[in-house]
Every structure is written in C-alpha cells, then in structure tokens.
Amino acid sequence: MNEQHPLTQAVVDGRRKEVGALVTQCLEAGESAGSILENRLVPGMMIVGERFKQNEIFVPEMLIAARAMKEALKVLEPLLLVAGVKPEHTAVIGTVEGDLHDIGKNLVAMMWKGANIEVIDLGVNVPAAKFVESVKQHKPQLVGLSALLTTTMPAMRDTVKAIRDEGLAVKIVIGGAPITREFAREIGADGYSPDAGSAVDTAIELLRATA
Ligand code: B1M
C-alpha cells in the first residue's frame, strides 16, 4: 500500500479529532486551503470509495470518513470564503431526492459563497417539488443539483423537468461523480461542472449571460 500524507490517512481512517489539527499544521507549513482540499482531503475520500467498491470497508466506515472530512472542511471554510460585499446573485442548491451524499454539494455551496453568491442550501434528499417551491420563493438566478449515485440521476432529470414545466427563469447547473456533460445536455440543464472549482466558473458564465 502507498504511504499517504498523514492528513489523507486520517480522513481514510476517520480520525475526526485529529484532522482539524492536521489541517492547521498544513496551513502553518504554508500550504494553501485549496491545495489541502484537492491534494490531501479529496484523495482520502477517493481511497475510501475505492475500498468500499472492493468490499474492504462498509457503510459505517464510509460514514466515519465523511465525518472526518467534514471536520476538516469546518477549519478550511473561512479560508475558502472571501469577505465579500453584498451578494448580487442568489443560488438554490441541493442533493436530489434519494441521495444522501452532501460533501461535494457543500463544497460547491462554499465556493459559490466565496464568489459572492448568496446560497440557499436545501440539504440532501430534496424532492423536485421542494426545488420548485424554493425557486418560486427565493427567485434565484441559479439552481445547483448534485447527485452521487447512478440510481438518483433520474431524480435529477425529474427536477430539471419540474423546474422547466413551471416556466421558471433560472439557470440550472448539475454535477456529481456519475454526471457528465452529455447527461446535462440530455436532461436540459444549462451547465455542468466536474468539480467545485469549475462550478464557480460555470456559475459566473451563466450569470453573465443572464445579466
Ligand atoms: Co456513498 N457511494 N453510498 N456514501 N460514497 C459512493 C458515491 C460510491 C461511488 C462508492 C463506491 O461504490 N465506490 C457509490 C455509488 C455507486 C454508483 O452509484 N455508481 C456509493 C454507494 C453505493 C452508496 C450507498 C448505496 C451504499 C449502501 O448503502 N450500500 C449509500 C447510498 C445512500 C444514499 O445516498 N441514499 C451510500 C452512503 C454513503 C454514506 C452516507 C456512508 C457517505 C456519505 C456521507 C455524506 O456525504 N455526508 C458515503 C460516501 C462518503 C461515499 C464516497 C466514499 C465519498 C463521496 C464524497 O464525499 N466524495 C463515494 C465514493 C467516491 O466518491 N469516490 C461514495 C468527496 C467529494 C468532495 O466528492 O461528492 O464527488 P464528490 O463531489 C465533487 C464532484 O462530484 C463535484 O464537485 C465536488 C467537489 O469537487 N460535484 C458537483 C458534486 N456535486 C456537484 C454539484 C455541482 C457541480 C459539481 O453543481 C451544482
């Protein structure tokens, strides 16, 4: 087995109490918040996913690793956010119905906030009707849908359709591990991003186009 960075290993092992201190150590050593996220934390979750796929670990271990990841993100969040002026745009974001994965969605929300977009986070397992209701209530310019399971991709399609059927003028961005640009086109989403960093570029591009 390859030797991992201590922070990556702590995420894999789900050592929640240690990750905060290890993140701080990396920051003190001069590593940027973005690099810690991309090069230390996300690889930990990739290892966890691979081990799960190989039946080396099971749901409880995945959950424990996810909790450790969230602990690390708590330390990084203020550093990933800029002290912005009053947001000019609003986004509603959520993980689609049937899907409980929220780490990627939370990262996108965090990055959008960092880009000075007000974010209304509906959480996980969000039915299409709730997205529609929230768009009507908050009148955002942007909706973000996340899905991590191939089995919840149809819920993403249903959500896009429900928003379109209501004639709501809002741009829809989708993402998540099984999602592709092709799928986004197929279901009529306006944008697709493979990761949280590029989700900011996609959002800005779409918001410019609506301005
Ligand atoms: Co789940 N799980 N899980 N899981 N889990 C995966 C997704 C899986 C790939 C693992 C595997 O088999 N290798 C697999 C899905 C297989 C498939 O569908 N093809 C899987 C499975 C099968 C399951 C269960 C069915 C297991 C079971 O019960 N038998 C179950 C389903 C529960 C449900 O949702 N109904 C389940 C449960 C769980 C936990 C609850 C234990 C836990 C989630 C905890 C949580 O999120 N709070 C969990 C975890 C942790 C994972 C893995 C290991 C890690 C996910 C993660 O957080 N990644 C995952 C394996 C993997 O991804 N390698 C796995 C890190 C995160 C930063 O990346 O979420 O991809 P990600 O987000 C990225 C991009 O995708 C993108 O940007 C993010 C950052 O760059 N992105 C967007 C995401 N959303 C976006 C939205 C955008 C734009 C970009 O615009 C709006």
Image: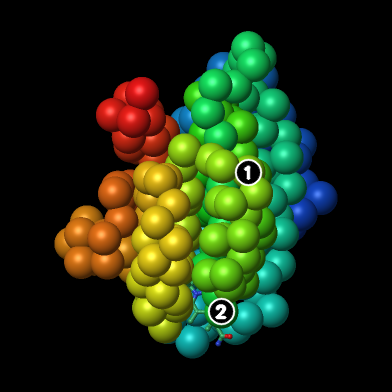
Helix or strand or loop: what does disc 2 sit on?
A: loop
20 versus 209 height, above or below: below
Residue at x 28% of width, y 29% of height: 209
* Residue closer to the observer: 49 or 123: 123
* Residue closer to the observer: 45 or 78: 78
Circle count: 2
Q: CA distance from mark 1 to mark 2?
A: 24 Å
85 versus 151 height, above or below: above
Depth check, mark 1 against mark 2: the one in front is 1
105 versus 177 height, above or below: above
* Residue that carries the numbered disc 2 in the rendered image: 98
7 versus 51 height, above or below: above
**Residue at mark 1: C-beta within 8 A of ligand 1:** no
Helix or strand or loop: what does disc 1 sit on?
A: helix
Residue at x 76% of width, y 54% of height: 16
**Residue at mark 2: C-beta within 8 A of ligand 1:** yes
Q: Quadrant of the N terminus?
A: bottom left
Q: Quadrant of the C terminus?
A: top left
* Residue that carries the numbered disc 1 in the rendered image: 138
Asked if one can make out residue 18 in the rendered structure from this viewpoint, the answer is: yes
- Quadrant housing residue 186: bottom left
* Residue closer to the observer: 177 or 76: 177
- Estimate the x, y position of residue 25 in percent, counting from the top left: 68, 28
Outermost residue toward the right? 17
Asked whether, in this view, residue 61 is left or right of residue 114, the answer is right
User: Label 1 is placed on what type of residue?
Assistant: His
Asked if one can make out residue 33 in the rendered structure from this viewpoint, the answer is: no
User: Label 2 is placed on what type of residue?
Assistant: Gly
